[in-house]
Amino acid sequence: MFTSDPPAVVFVTEFSLCPEPPLKRLEKFASSGADCVILRAKGLSYPEYLALAKEALAIFSGSPSRLVLHGSPEAADELGYPYIHLPLGVLRTLDPEKRKSYKTLGASCHSADDAAEAEKAGCTYISAGHVFDTDCKKGLPGRGTDFLREVCAAVRIPVLAIGGVAPQNARSLYECGASGFCVMSSAMTCADPKALVKEFKNA
């Protein structure tokens, strides 16, 4: 799903940061040119997340951007939707045959060992972070580009860098071996997601 040339731009949702209703922001994401949008909504109950996912799938039905569900194999199963991103702890609970049923299976990793485990478990890509300092992880210093380089060297599947990612530092992440960039805070707060994608692509 992700190739390193050109690097993928992936938006990750965090609606508490957004100045407008969730569906309005998702409509902008669907026409932004982002390669992928990960529908993360940790504060929602399962019924609430399922309802949001249904509406999001309708919004992205004609979009070239791929919607990926986050954190809920149950929602993916109920919707018959085979694109999902999971915390590593949730991935570990899945039966190996269940893992094989997804066309796209991502996992959040925080070390080279995590990355190798996720690849062995059948993931088609991983996210690795947090690379740089970010307000989303206040008080926790970023792991740095050496960390990202180590993760990229540990696996053969695509690695998406996450944490403090901006157009200004995107090239350094690409040079570490990252196949793309996960962007959350700036994606949720910017006035024009399409312009943000262009900034990353131009960088």
Image (spheres, helix red, strand yellow):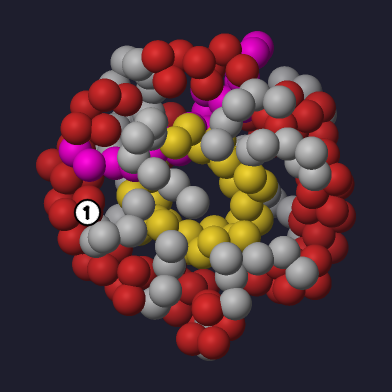
Range of the magenta residues? 176-193
- The residue that mark 1 highlights is 151
Q: Position of residue 90 (x, y in %)?
A: 51, 72
Residue located at (19% from left, 38% from top)? 176
Q: Position of residue 150 (x, y in %)?
A: 15, 51
Q: Is residue 180 left or right of residue 112?
A: right
Instruction: Look at the image and say whether residue 10 sits in the magenta stretch.
Output: no
Q: Nearer the viewer, residue 33 or 109?
A: 33
Residue located at (57% from left, 41% from top)? 36
Q: Nearer the viewer, residue 25 or 32?
A: 32
Q: Position of residue 18 (x, y in %)?
A: 68, 26
Residue located at (59% from left, 70% from top)? 102
In the image, residue 54 sits, relative to residue 90, either above or below, namely above
| Tally of numbered tags | 1
Q: Quadrant of the C terminus?
A: top left
What is the three-letter code of the residue carrying label 1?
A: Val
**Splitting the image into 4 quarters, where does residue 32 fall?**
top right
Q: Position of residue 161 (x, y in %)?
A: 35, 41
In the image, residue 125 sits, relative to residue 168, either above or below, namely below
Judge the density around disc 1: few (<14), some (14-19), many (≥20) Cα neighbours within 10 Å: many
Q: Is residue 87 left or right of residue 55?
A: left
